[in-house]
């Protein structure tokens, strides 16, 4: 899972934990199902296998239940584990106004008990069966996943369905989680040097639309103002099967999985969903610069951000390659210029949807962003000058096929590292988001071919339009702590 301050509820344990499953018995204090193999059903309408479009193909079955729940099954018998992921189409950028941080608060509420599992019993059910779990809130979704021994798949499907059907929403639980989230904001943002920089700060400075530009971690007054009625309404509206996708990756029999999914999820009623909010951003015509005083920081920092092309457009894939050329890895132009040649900093971090995901798992306006903490004797203008010089070199010298091929190798390596990880979560993440946002999880098998369509001319046009200074926001951290 991507490193992010939203690693809530349960921190990642070592995958070696899964090796202990043989000594972990089934939890007996909850009304969990037995593991009797269900009778295989016929292939559901809408099930489709992917076509052979590239050398590395991820197999999948994709279909939708009558209540609107999207289901993606991807069988992989490499290891005797199963990854179960449920993604809800609600993130922190489309949460209600005057309730900043509410999507994140609700993520915590999902672990406070359901019809058949008491408070914290969901977590105990996973851990006592040798598994690991987590949940996170991102721009456009909230997700929950478990990685368990393969023979516990049915148990986890039952548990996820149990909390989709209904939560134990009480004033006590709400008060408790409001306190937890407020403390998290204080620990991760308010009382940390560079707290919120740049992952929380930059969207608020660079964007104009409230939905993209508000404090999604949550203002403390908004967190305090959340009511029990707010929580119930939020759950009833957004945590419905027709606003979600269920992904299962790993060692399972498809007939069994389909039967269990129908048994446990099929009876959950759908709801009428609200109209999607307008996330559009105006074209930026002038560079923006901001300074943030940080009483806890002892070195200056700088972040830059450019508005991205529309997701899935040809220019979007071109920006993916430009990101590799300019920012990713020690061979990148900015690392070489800022770290190796000038020694302004020890590292440059960032990317597309940086710090909160990757370039694939979002749905709406996005920023290409970079950041660095640098030496006191280097001013912001010097860093921005280097940034402009490296972009101008690419514009003036052009990008030949050899450089494109190198960028494709890097992005292909990163992508395949994600989808081939033994835990299965990286694969599940892409399948879930492509199903949720595009109704097309098979897109995972076409990504490489889309990058290969990018030409030197398309890269030139993308550089000219999207990496222009007037499309840029610069945020400087002014350190107030003594060195």
Image (cartoon, rainbow, N blue to C red):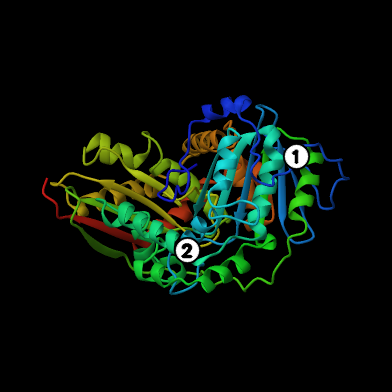
- In percent of width and height, residue 398 lies at 43, 45
- In percent of width and height, residue 447 lies at 61, 44
Q: Earlier in the sequence, mark 2 or mark 1?
A: 1
Residue 34 is labelled as 1
Residue 287 is labelled as none
Residue 282 visible (yes or no): no
Horizontal placement of 343 versus 370: left or right? Answer: left
- Which residue is found at the position 69% from the left and 62% from the top? 242
- In percent of width and height, residue 395 lies at 39, 50
Horizontal placement of 459 versus 425: left or right? Answer: left
Q: Mark 2 highlights which residue?
A: 172
- In percent of width and height, residue 137 lies at 49, 55
Q: Residues within 10 Å of mark 1 (few under 14, many from 20)?
A: few
Query: Which residue is outermost to the right?
Result: 42
Tell me the element at label 2.
helix
Question: As displayed, is residue 217 above or below residue 249?
Answer: below
């Amino acid at each position: 899972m991507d490193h992010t301050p939203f690693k809530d509820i349960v921190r990642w344990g070592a995958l070696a934990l899964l090796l202990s499953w043989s000594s972990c018995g089934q939890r007996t204090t909850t009304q969990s199902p037995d593991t009797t193999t269900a009778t295989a059903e016929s292939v559901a309408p809408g099930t489709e296998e992917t076509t052979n479009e590239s050398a590395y193909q991820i197999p999948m079955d994709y279909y939708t239940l009558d209540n609107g729940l999207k289901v993606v099954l991807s069988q992989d018998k490499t290891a005797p584990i199963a990854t179960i992921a449920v993604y809800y189409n609600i993130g922190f950028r489309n949460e209600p106004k005057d309730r900043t941080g509410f999507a994140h608060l609700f993520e915590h509420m999902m672990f406070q008990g359901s019809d058949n599992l008491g408070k914290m019993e969901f977590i105990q059910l996973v851990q006592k069966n040798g598994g690991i779990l987590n949940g996170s809130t991102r721009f456009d979704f909230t997700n929950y996943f478990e990685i368990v021994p393969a023979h516990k798949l049915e148990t986890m499907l039952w548990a996820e369905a149990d909390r989709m059907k209904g939560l134990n929403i009480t004033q006590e639980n709400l008060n408790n989680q409001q306190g937890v989230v407020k403390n998290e904001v204080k620990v991760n943002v308010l009382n940390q040097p560079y707290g919120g920089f740049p992952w929380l700060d930059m969207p608020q400075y660079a964007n104009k639309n409230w939905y993209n530009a508000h404090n999604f971690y949550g203002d403390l007054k908004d967190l305090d103002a959340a009511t029990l009625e707010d929580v119930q309404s939020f759950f009833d509206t957004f945590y419905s099967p027709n606003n979600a996708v269920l992904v299962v990756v790993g060692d399972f029999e498809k007939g069994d999985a389909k039967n269990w999914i129908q048994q446990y999820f099929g009876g959950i009623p759908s709801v009428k969903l609200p109209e999607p909010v307008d996330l559009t951003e105006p074209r930026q015509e002038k560079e923006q610069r901001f300074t943030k005083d940080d009483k806890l920081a002892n070195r200056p920092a700088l972040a830059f951000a450019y508005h991205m092309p529309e997701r899935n457009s040809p220019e979007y894939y071109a920006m993916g390659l430009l990101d590799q050329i300019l920012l990713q890895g020690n061979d990148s132009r900015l690392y070489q210029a800022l770290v190796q040649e000038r020694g302004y900093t020890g590292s440059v971090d960032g990317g597309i949807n940086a710090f909160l995901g990757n370039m694939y798992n979002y749905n709406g306006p996005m920023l290409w962003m970079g950041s660095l903490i640098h030496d006191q004797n280097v001013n912001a203008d010097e860093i921005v000058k280097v940034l402009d010089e490296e972009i101008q070199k690419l514009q003036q010298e052009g990008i030949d096929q050899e450089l494109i091929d190198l960028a494709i190798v890097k992005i292909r390596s990163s992508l395949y590292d994600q989808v081939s990880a033994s835990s299965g979560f990286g694969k599940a993440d892409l399948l879930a988001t492509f199903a949720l946002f595009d109704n097309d999880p098979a897109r995972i098998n076409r990504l490489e071919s889309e990058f290969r369509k990018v030409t030197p001319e398309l890269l030139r046009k993308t550089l000219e339009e999207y990496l222009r200074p007037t499309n840029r926001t610069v945020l400087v951290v002014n350190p107030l702590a003594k060195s």
